[in-house]
Image (cartoon, rainbow, N blue to C red):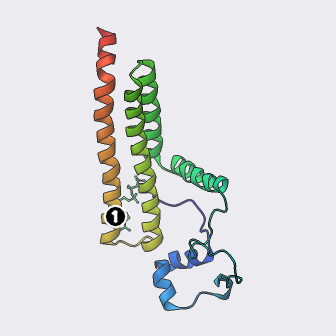
Amino acid sequence: MKSVYPMSSPSSAVFADQGLSGKAKQTQSPPPLALVVPAPKPGAKKPLRKNAWQVAPNLLVSFRYAWAGVSYAFVTQRNFRIHTFMGTVVVTAGFLLQLAPIAVAVLALTSSLVMILELLNTALESVVDLTVGQSYHELAKIAKDCAAGAVLLAAIAAVIVGGCLLLPPLLSLMV
Ligand SMILES: Nc1ncnc2c1ncn2[C@@H]1O[C@H](COP(=O)(O)OP(=O)(O)OP(=O)(O)O)[C@@H](O)[C@H]1O
């Protein structure tokens, strides 16, 4: 998976160029002057994550970033689009077949679990690519393969759950 996002900070661009994680870079040389965080004013509220390049200032902005992540996955990940389509079809079918509310809820949960894992898979791929760049690393392979495996298992479980809940009413409609 190739990232289409531009590098969000000069430091991450440097780390990506050199194939180094942020931590590794910090141990080699001090950051450029422009990246030095000014000392907090006396009495100022302590930042919650002082190493973050930016922290969402409020809930609305936080939701906007979260939605940006979902949009990114939808635009760039074919599998995420397939999971979204399948989830929509399955839940709609549950409503149309007038399944019990608990059954529709289970369908929605299992479908969204696949999408959630695909989002995490995309996030992990980005972090791995940020860390090792285009070079081969056995640990990068393990991380990506395991993340992809998590999506696969969830997708298999979703197919089984969907089959168990949707097939009986569908078959009874046909006979
Ligand atoms: N830096 C790397 N080092 C070693 N193996 C890698 C590396 N990058 C990718 N791979 C291998 O290539 C496979 C495909 O990588 P990719 O980044 O396309 O992930 P993917 O899970 O196929 O992506 P998607 O979920 O978008 O289909 C990984 O599962 C892994 O086995």
Type of residue at label 1? Ala
| Residue 133, percent from left and from top | 45, 71
Residue 61 shown left or right of residue 145 in the figure: right
Q: Residues within 10 Å of mark 1 (few under 14, many from 20)?
A: some
| Residue 81, percent from left and from top | 48, 42
Tell which of 130 and 53 is nearer to you. 53
Tell which of 133 and 55 is nearer to you. 55
The residue depicted at 66 percent of the width and 56 percent of the height is 61
Helix, strand or loop for disc 1: helix
Examine the rendered structure and indicate whether residue 105 appears above or below residue 28: above
Ligand 1 sits in which quadrant?
Answer: bottom left
Examine the rendered structure and indicate whether residue 151 appears above or below residue 38: above
Residue 134 shown left or right of residue 33 in the figure: left
Tell which of 102 and 164 is nearer to you. 102
Task: Give the quarter of the figure containing the C terminus.
Answer: top left
Q: Residue furthest bottom?
A: 29
Q: Is mark 1 within 8 Å of ligand 1?
A: no
Q: Which residue is mark 1?
A: 143
The residue depicted at 50 percent of the width and 79 percent of the height is 22
Name the quadrant containing residue 167: top left
Q: Residue furthest top?
A: 175
Tell which of 59 and 168 is nearer to you. 59
The residue depicted at 32 percent of the width and 26 percent of the height is 165
